[in-house]
Amino acid sequence: MSSILFSPMDIGGLTLANRIVIAPMCQYSASEGRAGDWHQIHYGHLAFSGAGLLIMEATAVAPEGRISPFDLGIWSDEAEHALDRVVRSVRGVSRMPLSLQLGHAGRKASHARPWEGGGFLGPDKGGWRPVAPSGMPFEADEPAPQALDEAGLARIKTAFRDAAKRAAKLGFDAVEVHAAHGYLLHQFLSPLSNVRTDGYGGTLAGRMRFPLEVVETVREAFGGPVGVRISGTDWVPGGWQVEDSVLFAAELKKRACAYVHVSGGGLSPLQTLRTGPGYQIDMADTIRRETGLRTIGVGLITEPEQAETIVASGQADLVALGRAMLYDPRWPWHAAARLGAKVDAPPQYWRSQPYVVKGLFG
């Protein structure tokens, strides 16, 4: 029986060779937003993996939108040119479609890199004052972010628009708007971080308003497939829940979004969750069934048979791997071998096929 995981899938007019997605994974290795040698080698390496789609890491649309001072960015000509070098290099050796995740960290900006402790960085340590929907910090001991006024909202929408235009100019096949993991657009969605009393807060419709406006702006500026990554739940009582995600996804579908990429959490240090293999797939399943929108499922997907079951049973249209792909950049090769499928690989590597595996590389 043929593998569903290794069957083609269309997202917004873009045809993927299989249902395996490389999830965006922050590298915290840029200089003033500019990609460098690390990114060229890292993404070139992943481009040989045979996955159906490579989504590049969260890329800040404005300097103050970086999670750390070392985040990748796309707000300037210099950052665009540096990223162009990476894209051209990958394009020269791989047919894999490329997507760019556009993000703004909001109140979770200005933090140290994870391997340097991840703590908040004040201006005296190379950081800055973050902005957010409301003046509520992520951690209680952090300074309050600046609540965005009307001019600030307009500035951020313009930054997303300009970033989408730059992504189109660079030749990305798709873009993904980051509205998950407690970053700015997620902060607007959740009642735990959005206590505004204007038209961008209060009701669910009000809290969804700014993220939807950003998505519309990106869709218009990019002109190709646009997906959205969301946290299906805050994992906190009284916060954003999967029922809200269903309604948000329905609004995204009305705006011709190509897919919703369903993760979870990240908004509050009070979150409580039980992790396990595929622990967030149920949310993707619910959203897919309720809305009919294409979904990417995530959450400790490590085994080929597990990924095959998820897509074959209709729980998600595609599966995304992050840490598993960092640990094993040839995961799709090994999955194809286990599932009796073919995978795209550079001809320079064809002779690496194990003797017991026949017809692996297409």
Image (cartoon, rainbow, N blue to C red):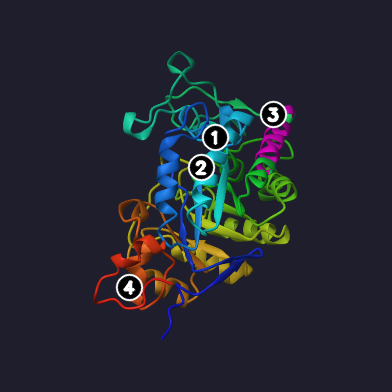
Magenta run includes residue 163? yes
Asked which secondary structure carries label 4, the reply is helix
Decide if residue 116 is in sight here.
yes
Decide if residue 183 is in sight here.
no
Residue at position x 63%, y 44% from top? Answer: 170
Is the Cβ of the residue at disc 3 closer than 8 Å to that at disc 2? no
**Amino acid at circle 1:** Ala
Name the residue that disc number 1 marks.
82
Name the residue that disc number 3 marks.
152
Instruction: Point out the image quarter for the C terminus.
Output: bottom left
Distance, label 3 to label 2, CA atoms, is: 31 Å
Residue at position x 50%, y 47% from top? Answer: 56
Name the residue that disc number 4 marks.
337
Instruction: Point out the image quarter for the N terminus.
Output: bottom left
Pick the front one: 273 or 297? 297
Residue 44 is situated, as x and y percent measured from the top left of the image, at 43, 49
Tell us which disc is closer to us: 4 or 3.
4
Name the residue that disc number 2 marks.
86
Sooner in the amino-acid sequence: mark 4 or mark 2: 2
Is the Cβ of the residue at disc 2 closer than 8 Å to that at disc 1? yes
Sooner in the amino-acid sequence: mark 1 or mark 4: 1
Sooner in the amino-acid sequence: mark 3 or mark 2: 2
- Residue 204's mark? none
Left or right, residue 338 beside residue 47: left
Distance, label 1 to label 4, CA atoms, is: 36 Å
The span shown in magenta is 151-164
Tell us which disc is closer to us: 4 or 2.
2
Q: Quadrant of residue 244?
A: bottom right
**Amino acid at circle 3:** Gly
